[in-house]
Amino acid sequence: MLSQIAFWGAVELGLVFAFVAIGVFLAFRVLDFPDLTVDGSFPLGAAVAAVLITVGINPWIAAFAAMLAGAAAGTVTAFLNVRFRILNLLASILTMIALFSVNLRVMGKPNVALINADTMLSPFFGLGMREVYVRPLFVGVLVVIAVIAVWRFLESDAGLAMRATGANPHMSRAQGIDTSWQVYLGLALSNALVALGGALFAQTNGFADVTSGVGTIVVGLAAVIIGETLFGARGILLALIGCVVGSILYRIAIQLALSTDALGLKASDLNLVTAVLVAVALVLPRLRRGASS
Amino acid sequence: MIDLSNIHVTFGKGTPLQKDALKGVNLTIEEGSFVTVIGSNGAGKSTLLGVLAGDVLANEGKVMIGKTDVTRKSTSARAGLVARVFQDPLAGSCGSLSIEENLALAARRGERRGLRSALGPRRRELFRERVAELNLGLENRMKDRMDLLSGGQRQAVSLVMATLAGSEVLLLDEHTAALDPGMAEFIMKLTQRVVSERKLTTLMVTHSMRQALDFGHRTIMLHGGEIILDVSGDSRKDLQVEDLIAMFRKMRGETLDDDALLIG
């Protein structure tokens, strides 16, 4: 079984990656745009926030700056796709690769430590609650705010236009929706959320690392798919809650797999375990459908 | 009002596959007039519709809709002037959105879309009323996904969507072609009602000569990118499908070999 610390650590990490899951949901599901930019925008968010915090800037402002940087990264991908008609997947890979260098430039070195710096969480330590609870609680509150904001947006006239763009672009244009603008807006929003996840990751873990982005997209997708498997397609709010729950369950599953001695897995097996979990999550709905028909 | 002057459309200009889809089309449709368009495959019907909708930009000529010159305007930029129902029932709506969400999308056609909730109580009630007028029982399924509906039901909702926001013209692109005969008749009756109630300037492309003569005030026939027949008033009233075929032969001086044109 998991120790309490390991369990709450998994929940905390799941909540941090819930931002990634919501961002991936916006790109993949709402806009139908397979966007791999997130592998670069997650460490970009971490790098921007960490560097700004180490030079003494308010961590909230640093997190906001990280979101802007993420939005800019998303805009680059959208620009390559919309303006030059580069295949969406390829456009996002180009941005992702470029971001690796950008992230090194931002940090000036492969990683930045935040050990003694004031983070967004600092004021909440020492209020009497144990640190192991404070962290997931703090991130959880931010996740709830993000879920409500994205939910209200997607159910507004503007959000409906974005959903229509992903579902039927030709019809959307006939309804007066500028679909190019929607791709810009959607990818900016998606990558801003992912970068915010990166900024929170840096602050809860005390470091930003240029390699921390590897596989972000798979983790985000895993959360989205687990959420869909659990909740089905029953409206935007449930889909978003599914992203959050999926992200947490994914982390707990990984933690369980790695801490069960009987399986003999090591931390270095993480990517293999992730791939197997995502494959299982992808196959399960299909098996279920097969059984019912 | 629609005013097309000297419209030329050439696809693949300068390539071996160059095709003149429209060759100097002139067409004026008065406000509130209902015009039906016929022609064989490749005659230029779809291109004509595309030029009006914005999907095809004319190489030459001028397109006026109402008082606006839309010649160079994109589809989305002129959407406030143009309402449209597509041939494919899947094309005119979003299958993954609910009926009421599709209606909410259409209600703001050509307008700014803000952060207000797309489905407030007042709008919901309006949409329900409008869908109830169809007598298809869909008013009780407003939250159902659009792709759960049959082709005919989707076309019926598409017609409601086309009339939720104001527009200068209504374009119907063979909108009954994919339906069974019973449903096609229902959709045509509905179309007739909607067009006359709202006095919409309407252009209907159809595959059926029967439909072309039975509905609307005026019929035009396209062939090889040109308008070869334009009838209205008394001369149209006396016209039979057989006459249309005979006229077609006389004007072109060639034999009609396109069976598709005869059906219906």
Image (cartoon, rainbow, N blue to C red):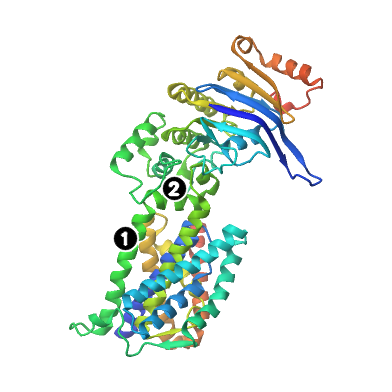
| Disc 2 crowd, CA 10 A, few/some/many (<14, 14-19, 20+) | many
Q: Secondary structure at mark 1?
A: helix
Which residue is most to the left? A128
Note whether B115 is above or below B85 in the view shown. below
Q: Which mark is residue B97?
A: 2
Question: Where on the picture, by quarter, is residue B19?
Answer: top right
The image shows residue B38 at horizontal and vertical percentages of 66, 26
From where the camera sits, is residue B240 visible?
Answer: yes
Of tags 1 and 2, which is closer to the observer?
1
Left or right: where B102 falls relative to A89: left
Q: CA distance from mark 1 to mark 2?
A: 20 Å
Left or right: where A45 falls relative to B219: left
Number of marks in the rendered image:
2
Chain under disc 2: B
Q: Secondary structure at mark 2?
A: loop
| Disc 1 crowd, CA 10 A, few/some/many (<14, 14-19, 20+) | some
Which residue is most to the bottom? A116
Chain under disc 1: A
Q: Nearer the viewer, residue A72 or B127?
A: A72
The image shows residue B261 at horizontal and vertical percentages of 70, 25
Note whether A112 is above or below B31 in the view shown. below
Residue located at (43% from left, 24% from top): B198
Question: Where on the picture, by quarter, is residue A149?
Answer: bottom left
Q: Which mark is residue A148?
A: 1
The amino acid on which the numbered mark 1 sits, given as a three-letter code, is Ile
The amino acid on which the numbered mark 2 sits, given as a three-letter code, is Leu
Residue located at (62% from left, 28% from top): B206
